[in-house]
Amino acid sequence: MSSGPVPSPTPETAPFWESTRARAMRLPHCTPCGRPHFYPRSYCPFCHSAELEWREVSGRATLASYVINRRPGPAFEGASQIIALVRLAEGPRMMTNLVEVETDPVSLRLGMPLRVRYSERGDQVLPLFAPAEVAA
Amino acid sequence: MHGGNVAIVGAAETRDLGTLPDRSVLQLHTEAAMRALSDAGLGPDDVDGIANDGMPPFDVSHYLGIRPRWIDGTSVGGCSFMLHVRHAAAAIAAGAANVVLITHGESGRSGVGTRPWAPDPASLSGQFEQPFGAGAPFATFTTPVLAFLEERGMTRRDLAEVVAAQREWSDGNPRAARNRRISADDVLAAREIAYPFTRDMCCVVTDGGGALVMTSAERARDLPSADRAVHLLGSGEAGGTPIVSQMDDLGSFGAFRTACGEALRTAGITHADVDHVMFYDAFAHLPLYMLEDSGFVGRGESGAFVADGGTRPGGALPMNTNGGGLSYTHTGKYGMFAIQEAVRQLRGEAFRQVPGVEVSVVQGVGMMFGAAGALVLGNRT
Ligand SMILES: [Zn+2]
């Protein structure tokens, strides 16, 4: 169980958070244009269709950008944290934390392959990411 | 609404900036308002339009005994004031208001008379940013920068050069929170806040306020402040993303391109006509994005342009001549202070005056990459 703020799902995001509690990650995919999107919405942001279907994604991603936060808020118990923007293999980008890696830029390379990890936070489960070579 | 038919006739900051625990947010708004009205040669009874961000606009008008017939509470963070100026110009042009008072006050350091910020765990940020520690702007607004730098072959030294250049402008200014020159090496050696950002790459945190008074160019000609009127030549605004991870492109911000593009187009000018720019710098990467996205330099050219002195005193494009949010002041919503410095430069009244400024571009950003607003201001129509 990690410490920090707990997300509170809304009707359009609840299936996402239900999926992570089941240690999988599902995103809305648009039936007409075939594209997944993040964050979950009631309409496809690309073609504006309401015909959406929740499908599981692979949990593979690459590191798009990051900062190493040296001053985490009190809820995070003080340790430096890597706040990362990752690009999912299916296309969408999301924010997360990197785990199982040193909080040092020497260990971090943009584009490096990542795999999802699941971490309990209150009554929710957050999708975090680790370097793919560690997670393999 | 453009073309020089609307003018800023009064502009002022609070007497003091910095740490002001003896003043409430409302006092900061209203002190700035009264000073701006005095600057214009007008009084509260002349005002029929009111705009501000951060509290209901009628909190300010009622405090001052003003009964507005036009109200704008546009609240898009630190660039709200650029939008207020643009909206006020439309209202004045349409006859919906004659004299508009735009105010800002924030007790960003001392927190007097202000509500504590409590993120909603059901908001987009509450679900998809806050749980990962991305709450404070220094650990959120900053997240795309490594992608920006890497795709250009730039490094964190390019961020440090932005800070060093701006300290040349604030050097010795008693109103600036950080007013001593600093080298890029010093900036890189400072305490790390959120890698790759060190302390000096992050804005100061202050208390203060500022206000603007706008009216028609026709009315402006009859005021005692007539020879100091600053005309709105063009403007633009644009919406971005409520959460940084969803930027279309981590290395470029579409709202800057849209807002600045429209501001230049409506002013009917090109980049070559611009003498001075104020680029909202909550963090050192923003001026780099803005230089490129607003088209003053090509994609990938911002770092070298700054490092080679292009934005310093004597450079081709004087930028952030009060020292910016990084050095001058940043109450939490810096946009008002960016406009104030552009007005001072256009009036020839700046602490570090650039000779012959006739056209200034002000580019604001708000709610991190949530919104942008741009103004083209000139000292003649
Ligand atoms: Zn679609």
Image: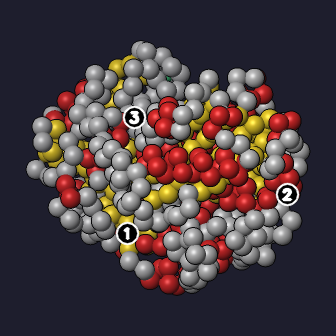
Q: Residue at point 46% right, 41% down?
A: B54
Q: Which one is in front in this view, the residue at disc 3 or the one at disc 2?
A: 2
**Relative vertical location of residue B31 with respect to residue A22 in this rendering, above or below:** below
- On screen, residue B293 versus residue B330, left or right, reads right
**Residue with the mark numbered 3:** A38
Q: Which is more toward the observer, A49 or B329?
A: B329
Between B358 and B209, which is closer to the camera in this rendering?
A: B209
Is ligand 1 within 8 Å of the beta carbon of the residue shown at mark 3? no
Give coordinates of residue B186: x percent, y percent: 50, 84
Q: Chain of mark 1?
A: B
For mark 3, give the secondary structure: loop
Circle nearer the viewer, 2 or 1: 2
Amino acid type of the residue that numbered disc 3 sits on in the rendered structure: Phe
Looking at the image, can residue B46 be seen? yes
Q: Are marks 3 and 2 in contact (CB under 8 Å)?
A: no
Dot 2: what SS? loop
Front disc: 1 or 3: 1
The reply to whether label 2 and label 1 mark residues of one chain is yes
Q: Please state the horizontal and vertical placement of residue A88, each as a whole percent of the image.
A: 38, 44
Quadrant of residue B312 within the rendered picture = bottom right
In the image, residue B140 lies at what x, y percent?
A: 40, 54
Which residue is the site of mark 1? B193
Q: Quadrant of the C terminus of chain A?
A: bottom left
Residue at 63% x, 31% y: name it.
B49
Three-letter amino acid code of the residue under disc 1: Ile
Q: Are marks 1 and 3 in contact (CB under 8 Å)?
A: no
- Please indicate whether residue B322 sits to the left or right of residue A39 in the image: right
Residue at 58%, 75% in the rendered image: B174
